[in-house]
Image (cartoon, coloured by chain):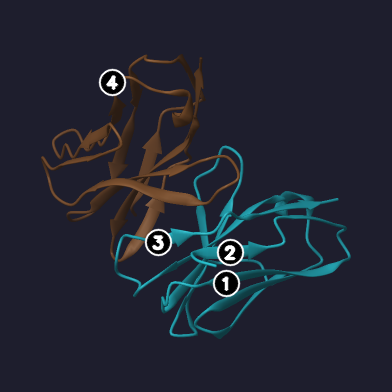
Chain colours: A brown, B cyan
Amino acid sequence: GNSVTQMEGPVTLSEEAFLTINCTYTATGYPSLFWYVQYPGEGLQLLLKATKADDKGSNKGFEATYRKETTSFHLEKGSVQVSDSAVYFCALRGNNRLAFGKGNQVVVIP
Amino acid sequence: ETGVTQTPRHLVMGMTNKKSLKCEQHLGHNAMYWYKQSAKKPLELMFVYSLEERVENNSVPSRFSPECPNSSHLFLHLHTLQPEDSALYLCASSQGTSGPLQYFGPGTRLTVT
């Protein structure tokens, strides 16, 4: 079945540092890929998406590229801010269903 | 009020209690969802309603009972829960069930004692 794997553990980094959160997936066919963000006390919000291989999704300085050859969709941001502190979920849609990863807590320290 | 709202935001209940979680969406969507978010686990889809009919039930124990009286409201009735049911319960809505974009509520933090 479809599944998403995110790197283990929270991510703590300083303001203006470079952020990478790894995401790999297993799916049949050609899934669409997404990153969702959950700010403290709020529900999940769609951050960015990519619907086919080599597509790059981007929003709010975040980017992720759909890599079919490595079945990956890593999230990156060049210079994080304290306001980026949140939980980030990688997800895929295949067979009309969304499958989510476990999420990564990101803490940005001033 | 806009978006997806959930009440209560926090709930503590004993194992013999009966309580209900409420979700309301003001987006005109026709599909609604219940998810369970536990620490260190992927988000788990529990129930899907489309046009007020349950279209998916992912092997959820019968102590969780959903109800969708209309396209704007979704309930999750709880009874005789277990401590391992403690989690954040998220409601979401979307237009149709095949699209990628689901709008999530802030969740109800449930603690079972």
**Residue labelled with disc 2:** B5
Q: Which of marks 3 and 4 is in front?
A: 4
| Distance between mark 3 and mark 4 Cα atoms | 27 Å
Labels 3 and 4 touching (C-beta < 8 A): no
Q: Residues within 10 Å of mark 4 (few under 14, many from 20)?
A: few
- Marks 2 and 3 share the same chain: yes
Going by the image, does B88 lie left or right of A39? right
Q: Reading the chain from its start, which is encountered first: label 2 or label 1?
A: 2
Q: Residues within 10 Å of mark 1 (few under 14, many from 20)?
A: many
Task: Inspect this view and state whether residue A94 appears.
Answer: yes
**Label 2 residue SS:** strand
Indicate the position of residue A6 as horizontal and vertical percent values: 40, 34
In the rendered image, the quadrant that contains the N terminus of chain B is bottom right
**Residue labelled with disc 4:** A78
**Residue labelled with disc 1:** B24
Instruction: Residue at 64%, 74% (x, y): give it.
Output: B75
**Label 4 residue SS:** loop
Labels 2 and 1 touching (C-beta < 8 A): yes
Question: Label 3 amino acid?
Answer: Gln
| Distance between mark 1 and mark 3 Cα atoms | 14 Å
**Label 3 residue SS:** loop
Q: Residues within 10 Å of mark 2 (few under 14, many from 20)?
A: many
The one of A87 and A29 positioned closer to us in this rendering = A87
Going by the image, does A92 lie left or right of B107? left
Q: How crowded is mark 3: few (under 14 residues within 10 Å), some or many (20 or more)?
A: many
Q: Which chain carries label 1?
A: B
**Residue labelled with disc 3:** B102
Instruction: Residue at 35%, 72% (x, y): give it.
Output: B97
Instruction: Residue at 86%, 60% (x, y): give it.
Output: B15
